[in-house]
Image: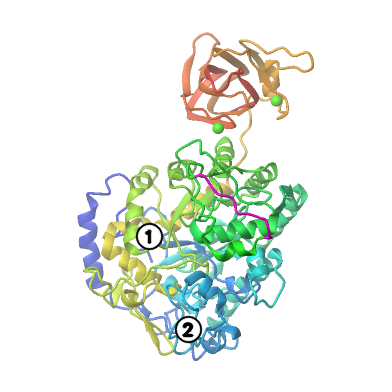
Amino acid sequence: MTVPAFLPRPRRGRRPLTVLSLLLAVLALTLGTVPSSAAGTDWWTPTARPTPDSQINVTGEPFKGTNSQGEVQGFVDAHNHLFSNEAFGGRLICGKVFSTSGIADALKDCPEHYPDGTLAIFDYITHGGDGKHDPVGYPTFKDWPAYDSMTHQANYYAWVERAWRGGQRVLVNDLVTNGVICSVYFFKDRSCDEMTSIRLQAQLTYDLQDYIDAQYGGTGKGWFRIVTDTAQAREVIKQGKLAVVLGVETSEPFGCKQILDIAQCSKADIDAGLDELYDLGVRSMFLCHKFDNALCGVRFDEGGLGTAINVGQFLSTGTFWQTETCTTAMHDNPIGGATATDATEDLPAGTELPTYDADAQCNTRGLTDLGEYAVRGMMKRKMMLEIDHMSVKATGQALDIFESESYPGVLSSHSWMDLNWTDRVYGLGGFISQYMHSSEEFVTEAARTDALRTKYGVGYGYGTDFNGIGDHPAPRGTDTGTTVTYPFTSVDGGSVIDRQTTGSRTWDINTDGAAHVGLIPDWIQDIKQVGGADAVSDLFRGAESYLDTWGASESHRAGVNLAKGVTATASSSESNPFTSYQPGRAVDGDSGTRWASDWSDDQWLQLDLGSTNLVKRVTLDWEKAYGKSYRIELSTDGTTWQTAWSTTVGDGGLDTAQFAGVPARYVRVHGLDRGTDWGYSLYEVGVYSS
Ligand SMILES: [Ca+2]
Ligand SMILES: [Ca+2]
């Protein structure tokens, strides 16, 4: 079966299609409501669901196949944490994704929350109030799950099933934990070792797959399919099922903590850690998260939570966050004031929380040498890097590395990067999804980046971050003028979705907000009500775009450096009695040696590739003495030159000049304006055909 192609294809000419798509959507609403579940053919209904269990409240066959362009369709949740109930010591998030003992065992509260939530300490740390709530989950669910509860399971498997039935086709399950939160939280029933928790969460994801398979008659039969490459993912989605990708979001991966700026891990630890995660099936990960670690600096949290995390970092590492003036329009989040929370009481006597200049909002820490090693290690293994939570400085360096290698494997999965990176991420071939904001906020932010998605021909995702210690969309009420009316038709047109019921509780997006993962289809309907059919069309192309980014990462090959060891000449070379700064030093393949010019603006370095080649990309690894304004000039004969690329805002470090391919034998880096009082100095110049 082919997906109904009523959704507009958001490339050129999308806008004129809007009226047509609205008309077709109305048709789908009137015609698409007949469930196609003839006896024996409703493969999507389990034959052995446990009783009692949750209802799904969706009828109709999940769409299969591809559209007329051969693309898979459906939504992507690029950031969810199914099993964070096993993180942080195992007692911070209460309730399980599934239990072989049944729903009543899965959806019950932590023991210390009984009888009235008085000891639900993390509830009132994160949520204010007194933490009191009715702890009873199944079957009454009076107080949880709820849009504003951060400590109760929101990813019961049957609710994930409903999200799938509503049109979701990719789910990234980020294995998550934080050793420090674990160690400071009073209740725990296991060690705080991060890798131990990651391994357990990976295992439980496979166990869940088995649990669901058993409901459908055996191995491989269920809708929940863990995938480790894009070929598998595409096959799963074509079958109408949900492709589940494993990711990792921890604060100190591979033991890469820093204590007083001393790294507690080695390159060998990073290699062993990446190999282990890869073997577990992990294909995307964060390198830093919440605390500055031995790999990179973080993007700060704001306000009181930021102060609490800053104190936590100090207690864990002996270092507070440090800020400096940002060098571009991009900045990290402002840190809360010193008096913001009680967290400062945990500091040792005589230790003061630093105060931060409002004009200095950038983390001084970027990628460390070990961090660069980890980024390159992920690239080598074709894994995708999550840049949310990285400082502006670290993100810039990571993007520099990927641009120099033309590597597309970059993800921003839940609106935690500086939004000014959007163009660069799309330019690389990366994928972006927005945090599960309220429908109005989601529509507004989606509209802001809509033109860029059209320019790059890409779809969009959402990152729900359920079980991720963050709020979810609040109820908007029933008098908004855009109320969701039940039942409604799924975006693909093939299913009918009613209010979701588990036990004796029924949830309604209008009055309950996004209480759990099963309300994703309701929230998407809300987005459609607020933003129109066009607002969901990019989301429906999310699965294809996510797999495009992943697939291009899988097929990435390191380019051949045409410049390595070639003949180099220059306008001048700085003389030094102890070492050589001759032109050949910029193409000797040694990142410790360099060419340096005399100290004036008009200088050049010229490479003779030996024969004419297609030249498409030139990489420059600058020493401190960088070029602010310079041109990349090409020639076939060394006499007639054309400018292939130029900049007036070079910032040193790693630069990549990418342009339409030009045949050339000679490549010249022509300096016009220096970034410092020194000359121009390059460790290495690379020249590539792709
Ligand atoms: Ca060199
Ligand atoms: Ca640069």
Residue 89 position (above or below residue 386): below
State the mark number for residue 540. 1
Q: How is the image coloured?
A: rainbow
Residue that appears at 36% across and 79% down: 59
In the picture provided, is 340 more to the left or to the right than 168? right
Q: Within the displayed image, which quadrant is ligand 2 positioned in?
A: top right
Residue range in magenta is 348-357
Image quadrant holding the N terminus, namely: bottom left
**Is residue 275 visible to us here?**
no
C-alpha distance separating marks 2 and 1? 37 Å
**Is residue 513 visible to us here?**
yes
For discs 2 and 1, the disc positioned in front in the rendered view: 2
Residues at circles 2 and 1 in contact by the CB criterion of under 8 Å: no
Front position in the image: 407 or 681 = 681
Instruction: Determine the image quadrant of residue 147.
Output: bottom left
Q: Which residue is mark 2?
A: 133
Amino acid marked by disc 2: His
Amino acid marked by disc 1: Phe
Q: Residue furthest top?
A: 639
Q: Where is residue 562? Give x, y as percent.
A: 63, 26
